Amino acid sequence: MPLQMENPNHAVVPNFQSPEYEEARAQLVNEAINDQQAATILANLWCIQNHMDKHQWAARLEGEAREAEAEHREATEEEAQCQLALKAEQEAAIQEKHKKNKSKYAPIKNIDVNVPSNPIILPCQYAIWKMKSGKYCELFYFTNSGLEEASRSTFTADEDTLIMMPTSDGLHKWIPASAARDPKAQVIKDKNLTWEQFNESAPHMITLMKKNDWPDDRVDMHISF
């Protein structure tokens, strides 16, 4: 049975005694039923039908509410699945990043120390590349002398550029230009640095580590050292 569009709870009993319903009353009038009684019968029949319509209306609203709730629940579950998939994808990307730079993200003992907040002074491209990849880099590049030399250096290149360099076994291989050491740089080994140079390099290197998203525990370890 098609559902009606109007709310039967708002319907008002018609005046079946009016001329509008004269023909309907005539269908009921006989020796036992007069015109007034016919109007009453019509009103009673209307009320019976209206009562049935009210039940159907309530059932319709209940069904629509259940359907809306089911759609909302389905949408919520779908959104949750999308969020879980996105989180899994992000975690996988982070794990892959940690896998490629194991030395940079290796777990160490947590140390409660303060992190230096010195302004960043950029060393040479070679040192920056070392910091980005999480690899060992000589402290000389972060001393005042190393930074001053980097500011005057003309050995710069696009980090996406590849250059061929000889290896220890006599062969050659392509490496990023930024990973190549400036052949003119006079680098002092860590063990030969003065205590003053060591104190100069530490805060500069730690600042650059922070800039390149090194884990806090790794940065804290260098500060404590």
Image (cartoon, helix red, strand yellow):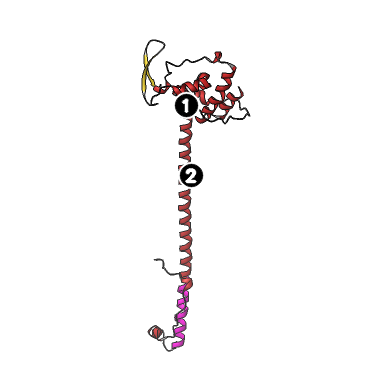
Can residue 32 be seen from the camera position used here? no
Residue at 59% across, 25% down: 223
Where is residue 20? Give x, y as percent.
39, 84
The mark found on residue 212 in the picture is none
Judging by the rendered image, the residue that carries numbered circle 2 is: 80
> Is the residue 99 above or below the residue 172 in the image?
below
Q: Is 223 included in the stretch rendered in magenta?
A: no
In the rendered structure, which disc, 2 or 1, sits on the residue that comes first in sequence?
2
Identify the image quadrant of the N terminus: bottom left
Please give the range of residues in magenta. 32-51
Helix, strand or loop: magenta stretch: helix
Task: List the residue tagged with mark 1.
Answer: 132
The kind of residue on which mark 1 rests is Lys
In percent of width and height, residue 92 lies at 46, 32
Left or right? Give the position of 99 relative to 112. Answer: left
Query: Is 44 colored magenta in this rendering?
Result: yes
Residue visible at 48% across and 65% down in the picture: 58
